[in-house]
């Protein structure tokens, strides 16, 4: 790999978590969508360009969060692409988070923006669903900042609570 001579390479451990549930894929996705709001970048842009006060824009962003405290930024249907290649699969990668929570980290280390929003993969395994993600506190630990660590542990708790909620039995 050719990198500039002054490039800095850092290695750090990541805790990858895989949670399996007997809950069907479609129900897990439905619950995830119900518990996360939808981030509306166009709305935020309109508010900013319209000269709304910072407090008003912040309130509007907070209102986009779902009951989990997260919002969805993007959903990539990897299963659809696999099906194009003849492989039956249900798999969706969600980018979830909260921009105001992320800002608490990015104001301390802008590079933390590489990992916000968080990535969550939902995959059907035939008899149920697997949810996979990297534990936020293990990702953000690389910044060696106690305040970022505190926010990352909050994200751990929020994500764990949401996963428990969406994988619960009826």
Image (tube, rainbow, N blue to C red):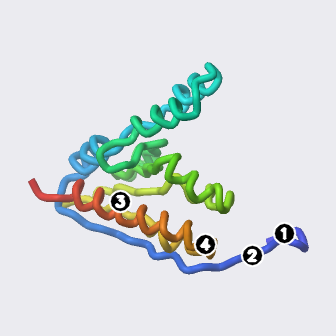
Q: Residue at x 52, y 46 (%)?
A: 99
Closest to the camera, between mark 4 and mark 2, is 4
Name which of mark 2 and mark 1 comes first in the sequence: 1
> Looking at the image, is 132 positioned above or below residue 35?
below
Residue at the (44%, 73%) spot, across then down:
16
Q: Is 96 left or right of 29, judged from the image as shown?
A: right
Query: Alpha carbon of mark 4 to alpha carbon of mark 2: how far?
Result: 19 Å
- Circle 2 Cα neighbour tier, 10 Å, few/some/many (<14 / 14–19 / ≥20): few
Nearer to the camera, 132 or 117: 117
Q: Nearer the viewer, mark 4 or mark 3?
A: 4
Earlier in the chain: of badge 1 and badge 3, it is 1
Q: Residue at left 17%, top 61%? A: 22
Q: Earlier in the sequence, mark 4 or mark 2?
A: 2
Query: What kind of element bears circle 2?
Result: loop
Report the residue marked by disc 4: 145
Would you place residue 23 above or below residue 36 in this image?
below
Q: Position of residue 72 (x, y in %)?
A: 43, 43
- Judge left or right: residue 151 versus residue 68: right
Q: Residue 128, labelled with which disc?
A: none
Dot 3: what SS? helix
Q: Are marks 4 and 3 in contact (CB under 8 Å)?
A: no
Q: Are marks 2 and 1 in contact (CB under 8 Å)?
A: yes
- Look at mark 2 in the image and give the residue it sits on: 9
Residue marked by disc 1: 3
The crowding category of the residue bearing disc 3, from other C-alpha atoms within 10 Å (few below 14, some 14 to 19, many at least 20), is: some
Distance from the alpha carbon under mark 2 to that under mark 1: 10 Å
**Disc 4 secondary structure class:** loop
User: In this figure, which residue is indicated by the disc labeled 3?
Assistant: 158
């Amino acid at each position: 790999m050719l990198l500039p001579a002054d490039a800095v390479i850092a290695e750090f451990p990541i805790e990858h978590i895989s949670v399996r549930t007997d809950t069907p894929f479609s129900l897990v996705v439905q619950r995830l969508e119900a518990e996360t709001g939808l981030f509306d970048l166009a709305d935020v842009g309109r508010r900013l360009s319209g000269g709304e006060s910072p407090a008003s824009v912040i309130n509007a962003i907070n209102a986009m969060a779902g009951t989990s405290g997260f919002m969805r930024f993007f959903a990539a249907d990897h299963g659809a692409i696999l099906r194009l290649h003849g492989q039956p699969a249900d798999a969706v990668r969600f980018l979830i988070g909260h921009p105001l929570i992320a800002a608490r980290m990015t104001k301390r280390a802008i590079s933390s923006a590489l990992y916000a929003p968080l990535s969550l993969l939902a995959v059907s395994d035939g008899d149920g669903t697997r949810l996979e993600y990297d534990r936020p506190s293990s990702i953000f630990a690389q910044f060696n900042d106690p305040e970022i660590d505190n926010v990352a542990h909050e994200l751990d708790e929020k994500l764990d609570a949401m996963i428990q909620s969406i994988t619960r039995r009826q």
